[in-house]
Image (cartoon, helix red, strand yellow):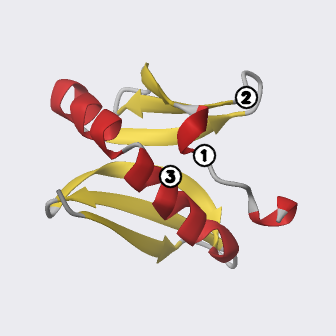
Amino acid sequence: MSVHVRAELIGEKLHRLHIFIDGVGIGEYEKSQEADIDRKTAEIIAARDLLLDLYKKHGTLHVRWDGKSRKKSVRSAAGIEVGIVPKSAWGKPSWER
């Protein structure tokens, strides 16, 4: 399975990361600064099987940081949490390197 991430500039510093698996757009990952795009692409690749399974069950996905619970929440288009990106897939943020 091939994974492709397309970064779209949506402000002065933030990018929206569109996720494609085998050419099919399955959703978007956390909004990111340029310094974090490579790390988040690696996270998407590490969580690829989970994201694909959730997409097949729930449709378009949106991954967002839940600061209160300190987790990466995978939500359906309706905004309902349908999964969590495991910490084992996370990389170090640019400000911690």
The amino acid on which the numbered mark 2 sits, given as a three-letter code, is Arg
Q: Residue 79 sits in which quadrant?
A: top left
Does residue 93 appear left or right of residue 52 in this picture? right
* Gap between marks 2 and 3 measured at Cα: 16 Å
Q: Residue 60 sits in which quadrant?
A: top left
Could you say where residue 18 lies in the image, as x and y percent from the top left? 37, 61
Mark 1, Cα crowd under 10 Å, few <14 / some 14-19 / many 20+, is some
Q: Secondary structure at mark 2?
A: loop
Q: Secondary structure at mark 1?
A: loop
Q: Residue 83 sits in which quadrant?
A: top left
Asked if 95 appears above or below 68 in the picture, the reply is below
Q: Are marks 2 and 3 in contact (CB under 8 Å)?
A: no
Among numbered discs 1 and 3, the one appearing first in the sequence? 3
The mark lying in front, picked from 2 and 3, is 3
Q: Are marks 1 and 3 in contact (CB under 8 Å)?
A: yes
Could you say where residue 66 lies in the image, as x and y percent from the top left? 67, 31
Asked if 25 appears above or below 9 in the picture, the reply is above
Residue found at x 48% / y 41% = 63
* Gap between marks 1 and 3 measured at Cα: 5 Å
Residue hosting label 3: 43
Residue found at x 14% / y 60% = 22
Among numbered discs 1 and 2, the one appearing first in the sequence? 2
Q: Secondary structure at mark 3?
A: helix
Q: Residue furthest front?
A: 88
Q: Nearer the viewer, residue 36 or 67?
A: 36
The mark lying in front, picked from 1 and 2, is 1
The amino acid on which the numbered mark 1 sits, given as a three-letter code, is Trp
Q: Nearer the viewer, residue 41 or 32?
A: 41
* Gap between marks 1 and 2 measured at Cα: 12 Å
Q: In the drawing, what numbered circle is on residue 70?
A: 2
Q: In the drawing, what numbered circle is on residue 80?
A: none
